[in-house]
Amino acid sequence: MSEKIALLKELKAECMSCTTCRLHKGDSKVQKPHVFGSGNVRAKIMVVGQNPGFNETQKGKPFIGAAGKNFDKFLADILELDRDHIYITNTVKCYSPKNRAPYWDETDACRHFLRREIEAIQPKVILALGNYAAQYFLKKTGMKDLHGKKVWSEEFNVYVVPLYHPSPMNMNKPVLKQATTDDFIKLKKMLEEMEDEETSATIDSDTDVSRV
């Protein structure tokens, strides 16, 4: 546990001083664009979005704006969890000028940070929020076909479940809001099944391992 925390603190320090790509310069609104991940280092669920917005840069924490509040409601109402149980981060750790989507060379420059976060946390499942994060992990686009499906990522050695981004714009659309509700219901069942599989795979000290 202490080793995980030390590793993440070291990684955060490296991230906060990163000047590898153009995003480290920020813009006229944001002079400190870096926002590292935060949450439970023992989390089984890792949530990954695109990159921090303006509100996140002001607080220094990911996913705390209106979309974050929408996500928290799904988390509490359906999964019966709060943020203390998950770890939240982004594919890209810096705010983009005028809140544009990151360019792919910026994403690639940041890739090692997320990879090392995943290796440190070792989640059972990653929730990829929105098309950008889904494409990052699965190399595919089209949330209509991807959302709510558990897909194994060979690159990151973890299951990934793409979800519609819980932005106010999306959640004001009844079809997308209902799809997200249905996806969280399916996600709850997935997590329960994964927990059952993990429990059934354990052995006690009296088990003859030669017969397992």
Image: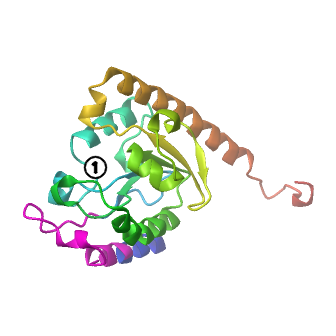
- Taking the spot 46% from the left edge, 55% from the top edge, the residue there is 136
Kind of residue indicated by mark 1: Phe
Up-down relation of residue 33 to residue 55 (above or below): below
List the single residue furthest toward the left: 28
Relative to 49, residue 10 above or below: below
State the residue in front, 78 or 165: 165
Residue 26's image quarter?
Answer: bottom left
* Residue 119 location (% of width, % of height): 52, 67
Left or right: where does residue 80 sit relative to residue 186? left
Give me the residue at 24% from left, 67% from top: 34
Q: Nearer the viewer, residue 38 or 144?
A: 144
Q: Nearer the viewer, residue 208 or 28?
A: 28
Residue interval drawn in magenta: 11-35
What is the magenta segment's predominant secondary structure? loop
Looking at the rendering, in which quadrant would you find the C terminus?
Answer: bottom right
Above or below 195: residue 17:
below
Whole-percent x and y of residue 123?
52, 55
Quadrant of the image occupied by residue 18: bottom left
Residue 5 lies within the magenta run? no
Residue found at x 64% / y 37%: 193
Residue at 43%, 75% in the rendered image: 7
Report the residue marked by disc 1. 63
Q: Is residue 26 magenta?
A: yes
